[in-house]
Amino acid sequence: MDDKRRNDLLIEEQRKRKGKETTVDVEAEQVKVVIFTLRDGLYAFPGADVKEILPLMDISPVPGAPDFIPGLINNRGDIESVINLNKFLGLPDSNKTAASRIIMASKTGLRSGILVDEVLDVVDVPLNSIKPPLSTLDHAIKELVTGEMLYNNRTVVMLDISRLFEKLVIHEP
């Protein structure tokens, strides 16, 4: 192959690569998020509101509690309520498995466990990668959503724990 042809091929290859490059702003403000599943969807809470992630444990039922509150747990001597987020959001309940977790969250003076199907990851994401939520979201969840982001090429819906607790206090699933 002659030098001119080889140079042309190298230049073309560089152009192709340049079009595929993505830049990452290392100075961008980061936020920690806890990514979890409910049914087939991906959701996340801000990491600052999550105090710990517990394995599924015995939940003691409370007579007369709404169906989205399966009961109470004993977390190292502290009695904590548990919210079934599937039921609260009007999603079909899912089978509890070894992967199911209770996310202990605290915000605005309230603390509760939130039952989820599986915790996938705890990651730092650039704040500017969280986009406004779609207007096509279901009404039951729309009021709790603060934004959306991508995780492994799948959309993750960011939920606001303070709005969730606010709706719980006034009992509006």
Image: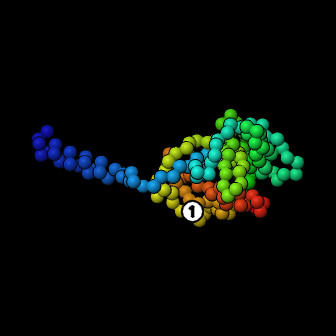
Q: Quick check: 47 left or right of 67?
A: left
Location of the C terminus by quadrant is bottom right
Q: Report whether residue 173 is seen.
A: no
What residue is shown at x 29% (from left), y 51% (from top)?
A: 18
Packing grade of label 1 (10 A; few <14, some 14-19, many >=20) is few
Going by the picture, which residue comes out furthest to the bottom?
135
**Residue 31 spot, x, y in % from top left:** 51, 52
Q: Secondary structure at mark 1?
A: loop
Marks counted in the figure total: 1
Q: Report whether residue 109 is seen.
A: yes
Up-down relation of residue 8 to residue 134 (above or below): above
- Reading the image, the residue beneath label 1 is 134
Q: Quick check: 170 left or right of 21?
A: right
What residue is shown at x 76% (from left), y 39% (from top)?
A: 77
**Residue 92 spot, x, y in % from top left:** 73, 49
**The one of 130 and 94 positioned closer to us in this rendering:** 130
**Residue 39 spot, x, y in % from top left:** 66, 46
**Residue 90 spot, x, y in % from top left:** 73, 55
What residue is shown at x 66% (from left), y 55% (from top)?
A: 107
Q: Quick check: 23 left or right of 162?
A: left
Q: Quick check: 69 left or right of 47?
A: right
**The one of 29 and 39 positioned closer to us in this rendering:** 29
